[in-house]
Amino acid sequence: MHALVYHGPGQRSWDQVPDPDLKSDTDIIVGVDAVTICGTDLHILKGDVPEVESGRILGHEAVGTVEEVGSAVRKVRPGDHVLVSCITACGSCRFCREARYGQCTGGGGWALGHTIDGVQAEYARVPFGDMSTHLLPAGVSDEAVVLLADILPTSHEVGVLAGRVRPGDVVVIVGAGPIGLAAVMTAQLYSPTSIVVVDPSPPRRDAAKRLGADIVLDASDGVSEVVASLTEGLGADVVMEAVGRPETFELCARLVRPGGHVANIGVHGAPATLHLESLWAKDVTITMGLVDTMTTPTLLRLLADGQIHPTSIITHRFALDRMMEAYDVFGAPAETGALKVVLTRSGS
């Protein structure tokens, strides 16, 4: 088969590699029908995730058809059409029993494209097949569902739920890439009064506006003053960091109100300064972490019912064998206007 292989910082190729085999009786093999590229994959290519070894097949977001199952797999059968979650879960460790699957100590967590080979390939091995996949609801498209492998649950759980968005809140989202736009989409499920999105890119601000943001700003547009005008000078109830840069995290900390929440979603490759000298007395809660994907079943129901529309953030579609071109497009959004790219076995 062919797969996107990481060969060290800045190096990737679409290589012929051996087909995956079952390694455990809880594994399944999936033929990949749709896959996407994540901003985290770009962080890996920059060298920001040093535990990813050279030779690793990247990718952790896919929809596919089950080809083979291990002898202990009970809920998934060959021929099933499934969403492959970005998080795998053993189902029995302490953290899985708490539905904190991202922290699985039994061989799961964020494994695909990280500590084991991933899904940017024609076929992939998925550990713990019963716990790590979801049957697709009737009538939904592969390209819609593949966005529920990572960015929708990540924004929902690490941003909206961890930030405790409530009806009437003023919410600020710093960053209008795919994660930030997914946060706009899922924050609306909780009826905030205002959603403010901050991003330097006019096309991304336009996309945020189309998805339901009330106010879109460049960082140079007096963001603090706008937020103050919406909150009687207090600051935002919830601020989400969806970029992964020191300066955007520090902006979030400046925008939050006393007693408010800063939810860091972005993947950081460099330290950020935590200004405790100004935050210590404000009773601010700062959260961060890996997605658990425990809300994926809820998001699948919302998708099937037409209450969320993730395909609106797809800007480019490719055949699977154009993976190298898809990376070039996704990795240069200022030139290409890319938000989210989707690759399918049949192409488009």
Image (tube, rainbow, N blue to C red):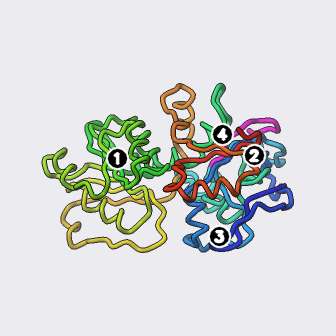
* Mark 4–mark 3 CB contact (< 8 Å): no
Q: Amino acid at mark 3?
A: Val
Residue 324 seen in render: yes
Compared across the picture, whether 67 is left or right of 276 comes to right
Q: Amino acid at mark 1?
A: Arg
Compared across the picture, whether 335 is left or right of 198 comes to right
Q: Which residue is mark 4?
A: 134
* Residue 269, percent from left and from top: 49, 70
Q: Helix, strand, or loop for circle 3?
A: loop
Question: At x 80% / y 62%, what residue is drawn?
Answer: 15
Q: Which residue is mark 1?
A: 164
Q: Which residue is mark 2?
A: 32
- Residue mark closest to the camera, 4 vs 3: 3
> Magenta stretch: residue 84 in it?
yes
> Whole-Å distance between the Cαs marked 2 and 4?
14 Å
Which stretch did the figure color magenta? 74-85
Q: Quadrant of residue 297?
A: top right
Earlier along the polypeptide chain: callout 2 or callout 4? 2
Neighbours of disc 3 within 10 Å: few (<14), some (14-19), many (20+): many
* Residue 307, percent from left and from top: 48, 28
Question: At x 81% / y 56%, what residue is drawn?
Answer: 2
**Vertical placement of 234 versus 267: above or below?**
above
Q: Residue furthest front?
A: 335
